[in-house]
Image: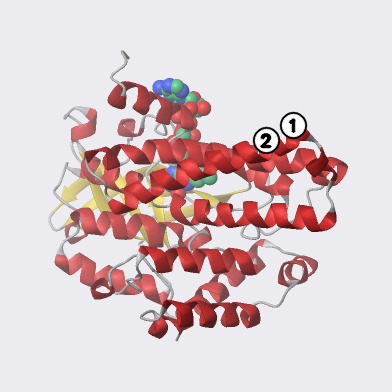
Amino acid sequence: MIIDLAHDPAAFRAALRQWLGKVLAPGWREDMESKGGGEDDYIAFQRWWFGECRKQGLILPDLPAELGGAGLSLALQMMVVEEFARAGVPPLKGGMYTVAHTHVPATMLHAASEEQRAAYLPGLIEGDVWCQGFSEPGAGSDLAALRTRAVREGDHFVINGQKLWSSFAAQAKYCLLLARTDPDAPKHKGISYMIMDMASEGVEVRPIKQATGHYEFCELFLTDVRVPAANLIGAENAGWATAQATLAAERGVLAFERVERARRELELYLARAREAGAPWLRREADRAEYAALVARLQAIRRMVRRLLADEGEGASRLPAFIKLLSTQFGQVYSDFRIRVAGLSGQIDRPSLPLSGSEPLHDYLNSFGDTISAGSNEIMRNLIAERMLGLPR
Ligand SMILES: Cc1cc2nc3c(=O)[nH]c(=O)nc-3n(C[C@H](O)[C@H](O)[C@H](O)COP(=O)(O)OP(=O)(O)OC[C@H]3O[C@@H](n4cnc5c(N)ncnc54)[C@H](O)[C@@H]3O)c2cc1C
């Protein structure tokens, strides 16, 4: 396993590079697309890719080894991201494992009991898929307005309600669920956080088709679903604070791979443009725009580093900034690539969401990124009101 070489960074990099050179032959993306690139292929491909990375011990690189993760140093995590980007393979984290690999560990470390950690963390390495059941019709930006009810009956909660935009819920084994346990309390104070087994009776999952043609999102209809009280994460009615821990991870550390990969991709983009003598290199305005993109990305990378190093009190304020700036970056960078490519940039070949190769596809996807985890307007509100102290 490559992970066994973690004590020797040079050997680790060499083994990683060698494995990446073999595991996915160049042209894998085109091969998959020529086979149709349908939803089932996309899901099966993600499972396969997870399995290959798992065989090398690379799953959950940031989780301490005593909790079952790979326990890699930040430098080695960056090396992994760099080598993955260099090889043009899918990201290590992401797609249908995003919630399992980012939201769940952050939530569990924040509030779960020892028993819950022991029960659920090993499954993350085995490939358990999780989904997030936060948003509802009428409770997105105003998440605390959620109306899904959880009523205590002995050692269970009985859940009734509807969730919306739950990514990969159709594949998920468990759901991080927010439900209202005290309808009489002020809205932030009557919410509880629990783990719902998606195979429970009364859980109905309906996938929603997106503009990209894929079906990542789902609606969840919950009718008299029985969730054991032991599945409560943290105290009853104290779910709001735990939800903030989940959202902080989704807005902050989730960006790590995205921005490190973007740095490598920006470098490759320039190198390839030089090799091909791309016309934009002769246009001063385009060169200036490229340079501004690099500067912008460097600033975001610095923020992510500060967050990971937990540099002082200010670090807790960073997720809102990182979410806002990193998703904006995704949008302006794909927009730049579309414009400098000219007509060919307008082609939207059916593409796998994880492939990240088509600028137009990335551009279309970038809008979702500016909305998920709290829209960028909400991030601006948070920054203005809570950090800059501006009036509401
Ligand atoms: C790619 C993607 C993945 C997602 N995955 C999940 C998931 O797995 N689980 C889950 O629970 N949810 C998920 N969501 C849902 C997401 O959290 C919500 O879409 C988001 O919080 C916005 O809520 P809404 O869609 O209800 O929009 P609304 O809250 O109705 O907002 C509509 C518009 O009004 C603006 N707006 C609203 N209030 C304000 C305000 N006070 N000030 C300024 N502007 C405002 C918003 O910015 C937005 O532009 C996902 C969304 C996307 C796009």
Residue type at the position of mark 2: Glu
In the rendered image of this protein, does residue 370 appear above or below residue 271?
A: above
Question: Does the residue tagged 1 have its C-beta within 8 Å of any atom of ligand 1?
Answer: no
Q: Are marks 1 and 2 in contact (CB under 8 Å)?
A: yes
Residue type at the position of mark 1: Ala
* Residue at 30% in and 37% down: 317
Q: What residue is shown with label 1? A: 285
Q: Is residue 377 left or right of residue 44?
A: left
C-alpha span from label 1 to label 2: 6 Å
Q: Position of residue 190 (x, y in %)?
A: 19, 36
* Residue at 56% in and 69% down: 83
Q: Is residue 280 left or right of residue 157?
A: right
Q: Is residue 271 left or right of residue 256?
A: right
Instruction: Work out whether residue 243 or residue 230 is closer to the camera in this orientation and state it.
Output: 243
Q: What residue is shown with label 2? A: 289
Crowd rating for badge 1 (residues with CA inside 10 Å; few <14, some 14–19, many 20+): few
What secondary structure is marked by label 2?
helix
